[in-house]
């Protein structure tokens, strides 16, 4: 008897050439946003927008496997329930998110947000305000010549909180800058030395730059709160490329407004950040609206990851990116 083809539903907005890597033994079924009837599929590739994906889910029957195109899958288990296996696109965001992180660190150390203001005001002389800003945020009030108009990354101590796929990519990109690296993950290990998260508070005072690149879970919720801000050095830079709720937003607003730290955020809590939220007007803050993973190369890379996982599924080989096993 001929085995029925595996039916794989994917967001209809994707150009078909992006699906060229998919195995020929599957039937690819485009799922439009305005799907209005029940449809049987075995494998679902949801559109990476939770609200739109939830609407589509109401019409799907028979789904056994979800191949998510993003690394974060926190909204999917409650939507599809425990009887579905869920895989993420681990690896697909590595380059874009790591590049955002390096750019955010350099932009802050080179005072780019301030110089964009200077450019818009059209006043060259304003550049000397940078010296005063530097003295104010770092507490370094020595007379320095020439005046401090930018800072260097070279020689800084960077604490990576999370040392998975993206954390390791960030480390690789930071290496040519000759920084001192400290690493934290759930569990401690050696080669390279990674500290357990239980050591976070004792490591924070050593770091000039703290990068968050870990998932948002019950354990990491508000991992950075007023206690951690108090441990951070005067003028330290917090970079959050992970998820907003890992940081206690009220404590973050206080730490920024008091001039204790600076921050570069791609993610916030809440998201989207509403108009008039106090974060929008905090000093020493660079904020981008959750864009770090979204380069033109991302879709192709992420669909290639899904196609590879599907080939393993068809061949009964262990899949590599399972975040939930069906019960
Ligand atoms: N801004 C964006 O556009 C964007 C794009 C992509 C991803 N992200 C975020 O980045 C996160 C990391 O992605 P990834 O691909 O690097 O994930 P990953 O490969 O799964 O690595 C996660 C790392 O976080 C560590 N970790 C997990 N829970 C922790 C905790 N409670 N305390 C300390 N460390 C903890 C893990 O520790 P162990 O190694 O000990 O397990 C691991 O080192 C994603 O979950 C997502 O939220 C954001």
Image: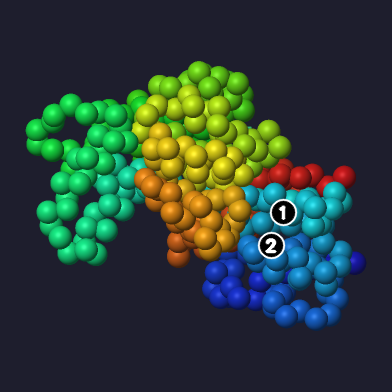
Q: Circle 2 — which element?
A: helix
Q: Which residue lies at the image location 70% right of the left edge and 49% below the top edge?
A: 74
Q: Residue furthest right?
A: 1
Q: Position of residue 115 (x, y in %)?
A: 24, 54
Q: Where 161 sits versus 99, above or below?
A: above
Q: Which residue lies at the image location 17% right of the left edge and 64% below the top edge?
A: 122
The N terminus sits in image quarter: bottom right
Q: Where 241 sits versus 305, above or below?
A: above
Q: Where 63 sits versus 176, above or below?
A: below
Q: Is residue 157 left or right of residue 16?
A: left
Q: Which residue lies at the image location 56% right of the left edge and 44% below the top edge?
A: 249
Q: Is residue 27 visible?
A: no
Q: Which mark is residue 259?
A: none
> Which picture quadrant has residue 273?
bottom right
Q: Which mark is residue 75?
A: 1
Q: Nearer the viewer, residue 36 or 239?
A: 239
Q: Is residue 4 left or right of residue 140?
A: right
Are the residues at dot 2 and dot 1 in contact (C-beta closer than 8 Å)?
A: yes
* Beta carbon at label 2 within 8 Å of ligand 1: no
Residue at which label 2 appears: 50
Quote the CA–CA distance across marks 2 and 1. Answer: 7 Å
Mark 2: few/some/many CA within 10 Å (<14, 14-19, 20+)? some
Q: Nearer the viewer, residue 315 or 301?
A: 301
């Amino acid at each position: 008897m001929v085995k029925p083809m595996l039916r794989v539903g994917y967001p209809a907005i994707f150009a078909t050439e992006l699906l060229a890597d998919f195995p020929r033994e599957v039937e690819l079924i485009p799922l439009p946003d305005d799907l209005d009837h029940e449809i049987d599929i075995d494998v679902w590739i949801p559109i990476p927008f939770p609200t739109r994906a939830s609407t589509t889910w109401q019409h799907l029957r028979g789904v056994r496997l979800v191949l998510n195109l993003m690394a974060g899958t926190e909204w999917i288990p409650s939507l599809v329930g425990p009887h579905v296996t869920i895989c993420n696109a681990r690896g697909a965001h590595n380059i874009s998110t790591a590049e955002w992180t390096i750019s955010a660190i350099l932009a802050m150390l080179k005072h780019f947000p301030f110089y964009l203001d200077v450019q818009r005001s059209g006043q060259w002389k304003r550049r000397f305000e940078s010296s005063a800003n530097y003295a104010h945020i770092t507490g370094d009030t020595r007379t320095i010549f020439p005046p401090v108009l930018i800072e260097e990354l070279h020689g800084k101590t960077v604490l990576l909180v999370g040392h998975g796929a993206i954390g390791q990519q960030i480390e690789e990109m930071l290496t040519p800058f000759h920084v001192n690296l400290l690493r934290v993950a759930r569990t401690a290990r050696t080669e390279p030395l990674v500290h357990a998260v239980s050591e976070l508070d004792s490591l924070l005072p050593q770091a000039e730059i703290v990068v968050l690149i870990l998932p948002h879970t019950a354990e990491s919720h508000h991992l950075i709160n007023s206690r951690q801000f108090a441990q951070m050095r005067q003028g330290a830079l917090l970079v959050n490329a992970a998820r907003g709720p890992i940081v206690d937003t009220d404590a973050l607003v206080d730490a920024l407004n008091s001039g204790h730290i600076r921050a570069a955020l791609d993610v916030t809590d809440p998201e989207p950040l509403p108009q008039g939220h106090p974060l929008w007007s905090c000093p020493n803050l660079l904020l981008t609206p959750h864009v770090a993973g979204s380069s033109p190369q991302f879709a192709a890379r992420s669909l290639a990851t899904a196609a590879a996982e599907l080939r393993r599924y068809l061949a009964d080989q262990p899949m590599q990116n399972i975040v939930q096993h069906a019960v």
